[in-house]
Image (tube, rainbow, N blue to C red):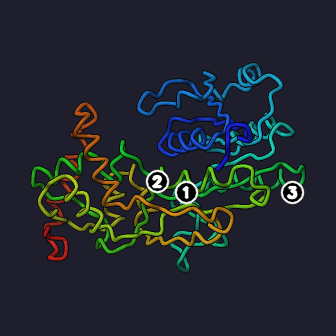
Amino acid sequence: MVTPASGLSVLFIGGTGVISAAAADLAVARGHRLTVLNRGQSTLRAVPAAAEVLTVDVRDPAAVRSALGDRRFDVVVDFVAFTPEHVRADISQFAGRTGQYVFISSASAYQKPPAALPVRESTPLHNPFWQYSRDKAACEDVLMVAHREQGFPVTIIRPSHTYDRTQIALLGGWTDIHRMRTGQPVVVHGDGTSLWTLTHSTDFAKALVGLFGRSQAVGDSFTITSDEYLPWDAIYAEYARAAGAPAPTIVHVASDTMAAENPDWSGPLLGDRSHSVIFDNTKVTGLVPDFFCTTPVALGFREAIAWFDAHPQQQVVDDQLNATLDRLVAAHSTVSTHPNLEHP
């Protein structure tokens, strides 16, 4: 355990997102001296009281330089870098001013469809279906070149689908919960049997914060996910249980058909969710041996439903999405409620 006297100076760029908020809480709890730099526009998740807050737009390099002055940090973590331009700006900003720069990439950048399971850090980065994933891979390329040529101290993190109590990890979000609670069919891609890994943000934070200050992690990449995986039909059934809804009536629709009906689904569905993903976390546990996940989806989903029930203003039912789902249900009328999904 790190004590306040031995804690690291840590800068989070972001700090109030699903992944970063839990990591901020844990970093402070472990005695690190945390500074959070963001625009101050998110109120859904609070910054820890012990953290220093700098309200700055990270896309304004001059403003960032002014806010940070000549300060140095043991660790800098950028949660909001999505393009090569973003990480080039970070390299310019933090070269020589941090002992470790942590880039939050994405496990969606791994080869799709995967040639073999489980997915490991050695799995190629190749996702022809989703620009977001290709941009993350391109960011990694820029950072590794900077590491090799300039000694830039990068550590690359690849999370998969990470959620917290403020998120419903279904394609339709709360709209899907509303449909299940009101007895309406829900749409699940493919035949519902592809395997998916969901990781609670508090579990992800254990591995991420555990890598802070680890010199062995510099110049390397790490997948951080749960070891629990479920087929999509079972994920919907778990949400129905958590929501106190009947066993879901599921309509299976081909992923290509769904993406054609709603182009916004194309990347997340064809480039990620429609493929079975099981991850090998051996590499990160080798450096963070106390990393293990303690929030199974059954517990995490109940926590999320309880949060939404306590915050009715967050229970947004998307009428346009509902109409799209209704069209898909009408066009694909083979409806099934699987016996193994029935509630006890």
Q: Residue 173 carries which label?
A: none
- Establish if 45 lies above or below 236: above
Q: What residue type is labelled 1?
A: Pro
Question: Could you say whether the residue bearing mark 3 is in a helix, strand or loop?
Answer: helix
The quarter of the displayed image where residue 191 is located = bottom left
Residue 196: image x %, image y %? 41, 67
The quarter of the displayed image where residue 334 is located = bottom left
Residue with the mark numbered 1: 159
Please give the name of the residue rendered at 41% of the width and 60% of the height, measured from the top-left corner: 269
Q: Which amino acid does label 3 sit on?
A: Arg
Q: Which amino acid does label 2 sit on?
A: Thr
* Along the viewing direction, whichever of 248 and 216 lies nearer the viewer: 216
Q: Which mark is residue 162?
A: 2
**In this rendering, position of residue 220 left or right of residue 326:** right
Residue 288: image x %, image y %? 64, 62
Question: Could you say whether the residue bearing mark 2 is in a helix, strand or loop?
Answer: strand
The quarter of the displayed image where residue 333 is located = bottom left
- Establish if 216 lies above or below 44: below
Question: Could you say whether the residue bearing mark 1 is in a helix, strand or loop?
Answer: strand
Mark 1 and mark 2: span between their CA atoms?
7 Å
Residue with the mark numbered 3: 148
**In this rendering, position of residue 236 left or right of residue 138:** left
